[in-house]
Amino acid sequence: MRLKLVPDETAINFLGSWRFTFSFSMVLVVLSIIAFFTFGLNFGIDFRGGTSIRTEATQPVDIGAYRAAIVPLGVGDVAISEVFDPTYGPDRNVAMVRIQTQEGGESISPAVLAEVEEALRGHDPTLQFTAVESVGPKVSGELVQSAILAVVAALAAVLFYIWLRFEWQFALGAVAAIVHDVVLTIGLFSVLQIRFDLAIIAALLTIVGYSLNDTVVVFDRMRENLIKYKKREIMDVMNLSLNETLSRTVVTSLTTLLALGSLFVLGGDVIRGFVFAMIWGVVVGTWSSVFVASVVVKRLGVKRDWSKNNDDGSGKRGGTQFATGE
């Protein structure tokens, strides 16, 4: 016997409440934009520039004591946060100390770094410094520009690809779904103030690819059914297509989430932000393929005579987005 997560035949009216689901998505988009401009992003060392020091100790992390030890050194803005990981035992306490870029230099000098380490060890002699990372302001600025260009280029490529493969209505639907996913992810990171670094940019680009893949599968079946059932209402055809691809969507999403869940629990704090973004991206990507991309196509309308013979048996071919017909 094989496991069936979804029955062979389903008749779920996905688009029956499309006004509510689409409006709900748009409200979330607006709230995400407001959150971004209200709270901003907790940029990591990649984008802010400066020096990041990772510490480990057997004693519990005392953020106030750490700060009191470093501030008298006059190194500028200091951000200290404790790293929580369920795989760490009680004798493994990890913290991240971030120090702003120093005036006239890309990072703190080795001498200043030694002073910081000595000051922290004065508070806790068991303290170990497991990693030191420095990024200058020029490099961080270039990384921000490159990250924005990467996301915009991905959206442009998606628009062009879907327009070639389907029609412009489908292209706009796919891009709307992807923008929805990216904006909601950024909004969530703004609200939760999770560190936003290059790994998250990689996650955003991966989310774009995942959402596109899911959307194209739905659009392929939708195009087939629009040709096959020319006399049925477009809403019925779309619901039929979504039901026919439901099994694939559920299996793909669940298997992906199983792998990501394992990484989130066991992968450690270094990749936890990336994995969290991916988990969120799988959820919103699946949602947007059904309740955003399909609704946009429905509202824009799409022709039904792609390339098949007409139903009247005349043998005349209907036009496509490329052909003018005969």
Image (tube, rainbow, N blue to C red):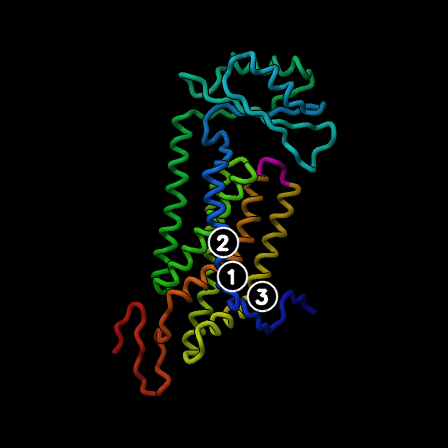
Q: Which mark is residue 210?
A: 2
Q: Are marks 3 and 1 in contact (CB under 8 Å)?
A: no
For the record, the magenta segment spans: 267-271
Q: Is residue 203 visible?
A: no
Q: Are marks 2 and 1 in contact (CB under 8 Å)?
A: no
Q: Amino acid at mark 2?
A: Tyr
Name the residue that disc number 1 marks.
20
Q: Give the percent coordinates (x, y) of residue 119.
A: 61, 13
Compared with residue 201, is residue 65 higher up or lower down, i.e. above or below?
above
Q: Is residue 288 magenta?
A: no
Q: Which mark is residue 247?
A: 3
The residue positioned farthest toward the right in the image shown? 90
The disc, 3 or 1, on the residue closer to the chain's N-terminal end is: 1
Compared with residue 128, is residue 163 higher up or lower down, i.e. above or below?
below
Q: Give the percent coordinates (x, y) of residue 170.
A: 39, 62
Could you tell me which residue is drawn at 58 percent across and 57 percent down? Answer: 253
Q: Amino acid at mark 1?
A: Phe
- Dominant secondary-structure state across the stretch colored magenta: loop
Q: Give the percent coordinates (x, y) of residue 263.
A: 62, 44
Q: Give the percent coordinates (x, y) of residue 321.
A: 31, 68
Q: Is residue 223 visible?
A: yes
